[in-house]
Amino acid sequence: MNKKYEVPDASLEERKQFSAKRSFILAIMAIIPGMMMVMVDSTAMNVAIPSLSKDFGVSFDTLQWVITGYMLAMSVTIPLAGWFSDRFGAAKAYIITVILFVFGSLLCAMAQNADQLIGFRVVQGLGGGMVQPIGMAMVFRLAPADKKGQVMGMLGIPMLLAPASGPILSGWLLESISWHWIFLINLPLGVITVFLGLRYLHKSSLLKSPSNSLDKKSLDLLGFILAPVAFVLIALSINVSTDSWIAWSMVITGVMLLIWLWVHETRHPYPILELKAFRTAGFRRGMFVSWIQYMALNGSIVFIPQYLQNFKDYSPFQAGLVMSMLAITSGLLMPVGGKLFDRIGIRPLAGAGLGIIAIALMLLSQMNTNADGVLIAGLVGLLGIGMGLCMMSLNTYILQSAPKESISRATPLISASSDLIIPLSIAGLSNFLTMRVAAREAVSGTGTFAAEMAAYSDTFMLAACIALFGALFSLLLKTTRHK
């Protein structure tokens, strides 16, 4: 009699597991296209600016605001992502922001002059700023408890391939059709994302608005004002000459507003940014190691294409091929890093990843004009290996260290902090490079070419030291996963 019911019971359990797995896969398929669409668009404009400046008859500096305005608009809305997700539910918030992004894309494709394009890019950025943090929070919530590292590692693949493919896709569209299609291509992607979202995300209980009191969904008005203004001022100051008193005024004002924001958010019962999460040692240390990674890696990789074009006479396309090794190797290693995170925890992964980044940067600092292009591509690939091991694993560790009820507000905090750290790191290392060029010329009396070569080596070595410090600091992270 017992045997009679063993098969149906087992079959029912298998069907439940299959249904849960299928639902999860379909939900991920609804989230990833929207995130990729925004990330591709964030880098696609980089190669389109020269062509657009000719088509609209304006200067290159004017068209740079097509990128700057978009990034500033994203900085404004990233802090809102957590409140928006809690207020309307993650699924509904995600669909709304994707629709806003697609609407902005349509307006951009219809722009008749540079001013219109800049304004419409701001509209596009208002939606795009919230798509990634809301999407990442949804993936983290939906992932099985014992496979969060693996799932977040898999999510890292499109997050790297999308920005890497943006310039390639943009260049092909510019040469084959017209610049309008850089934006029009978002329409079918957006429609697919909205359709899949309504079908597979909207009904998920994990993605609905939490059943808390309305007070918890009320908007932190002062935080809403302070956070975007502080981020915009600091981001704008990077795009203004450092010798200008206006730039210094923006930096000082932005920092003061950040301090005010910190004090306000840590005291507010329902803050727009969950800064109280920094009270948790694991979250605090994880964020610090993540910032070091951004400083060492993202702050330095912008100089590799410059080195290749200035000293190796590479074309932009050839330099792009070399840099594609970063996306390839990191994309291959991220799923591996995710699986290892679920088994061995963050400490060995963060230490090994940052250690590999430090070694690669040290080797890059020894390059000269005789360095082979294949060797440089290999070193760039080595950077990608280090990045693949630690980047998404650190993000998973940070989210697991945050209070469970604050996940939707912790992801905007990660995105907002990286949006500040990366440009500040690039600006800092750029200034260091300029100072080292002057110092090398003064000490050795050599020409500008030799001084610049030596200055690049100094800059890569500084970045390597930053990564090495991060590897050592990662020993303070917990060895096991935060449960």
Image (cartoon, grey):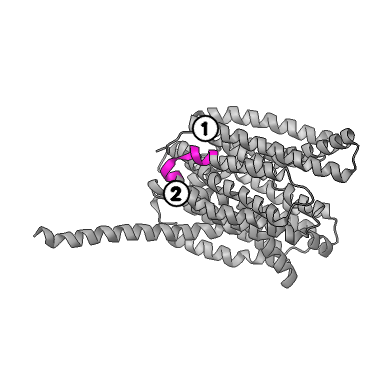
For residue 459, side relative to residue 186 (left or right) = right
Q: Could you tell me if the residues under marks 1 and 2 are in contact, i.e. CB atoms within 8 Å?
A: no
Secondary structure under the numbered disc 2 in the rendered image: helix
At x 74%, y 63%, the residue is: 111
From this viewpoint, is residue 165 visible?
yes
Label located before the other in sequence (1 or 2): 2
For residue 158, side relative to residue 4 (left or right) = right
State the residue in front, 79 or 169: 169
Mark number, residue 475: 1
At x 72%, y 65%, the residue is: 171
**349 inside magenta stretch:** yes
- The x and y percentages for residue 182 are 68, 64
Q: Residues within 10 Å of mark 2 (few under 14, many from 20)?
A: many
For residue 468, side relative to residue 461 (left or right) = left
Tell me: residue 320, above or below residue 474.
below
Mark number, residue 339: 2
- The x and y percentages for residue 90 are 48, 50
Q: Within the image, what quadrant is residue 345 found in? A: top left
